[in-house]
Amino acid sequence: YPVVAALLSCNVAAAATAGNVQAAVERVARLHLDDLVKTAGLRESSVTLTVLPRDSVNACIADARIEAIDTRSVTRMRFAATCDAPAWRTEIVVRATVTAKVLTAARDVRAGEVIDSSALALERRELAAPADAISDPQLVEGKASRRALRSGQLINRRWLIEPVLVKRGANVTIVARNAGVSVQVAGEALAAGRRNEIVQVRNKTNGRIIRARVIGENEVEPVISTDSAAD
């Protein structure tokens, strides 16, 4: 994602040499990447940086300012160095390599399929987009991917969705709870739904249509009256 320059910048001390300017760019880039992998919760991460040399970078009598221009791709991040005296501005490119132990698909996974532990593997991988990677299985298990996954493919957090637990026309169990007593009756889902979504369900015992919350695979609970589902 683009990074607002004001949130990722620093000043270099006065009379900065060209080498100091490029070193400051490296510091800013490393701070950004360290924060990125920490926020993503990546395990055993490793970051290496290369600042591409710029022969045209001059010394700066006044403070030089380093600001991020584009850090969407860690393989090519762009930073701006600006000096007031003498006045100049130049762009510097930083290439980074980020590796971490992240989750991959242990087998082929269909789009919309509920992901369980058997579908996950933890492997060290090089990451072009660290923010999209996941290391914690608990963030994935029970979810589904909106796209099909091939065996060995990285699990992308942007693709994860709550799976459809109830399909339209499916036979469901209506679970009514009251004062510690649980009653179950058969029903028919009149709409598809994911966990915690509200769908209409026909009670097969009396034909009554109720509103129910999806609580599990082919399992719902009434949201208006527990009595109406158990009549």
Image (tube, grey):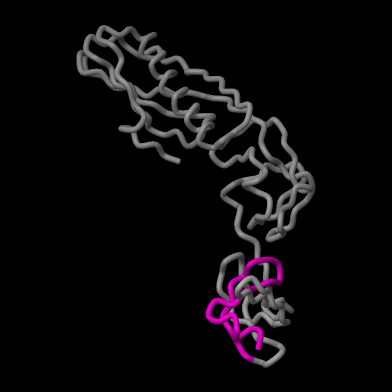
Is 4 placed left or right of 53 in the picture?
Answer: left
Q: Nearer the viewer, residue 180 or 7?
A: 180
Residue 64 at x, y = what percent?
Answer: 28, 17
Residue at left 59%, top 77%? 222
Is 181 placed left or right of 61 in the picture?
Answer: right
Residue 5 at x, y = what percent?
Answer: 33, 33
166 in the magenta segment = no
Q: Nearer the viewer, residue 65 or 118?
A: 118
Q: Residue furthest front?
A: 179
Relative height, residue 155 to residue 160 (above, below) = above
Q: Quadrant of residue 84?
A: top left
Q: Nearer the viewer, residue 81 or 231?
A: 231
Residue at left 65%, top 86%? 202
Residue 36 at x, y = what percent?
Answer: 50, 33
Relative height, residue 5 to residue 49 (above, below) = below
Residue 66 at x, y = what percent?
Answer: 33, 22
Q: Where does the C terminus fall, quadrant-wise?
A: bottom right
Magenta-drawn segment: 208-231
Q: Nearer the viewer, residue 227 or 56?
A: 227
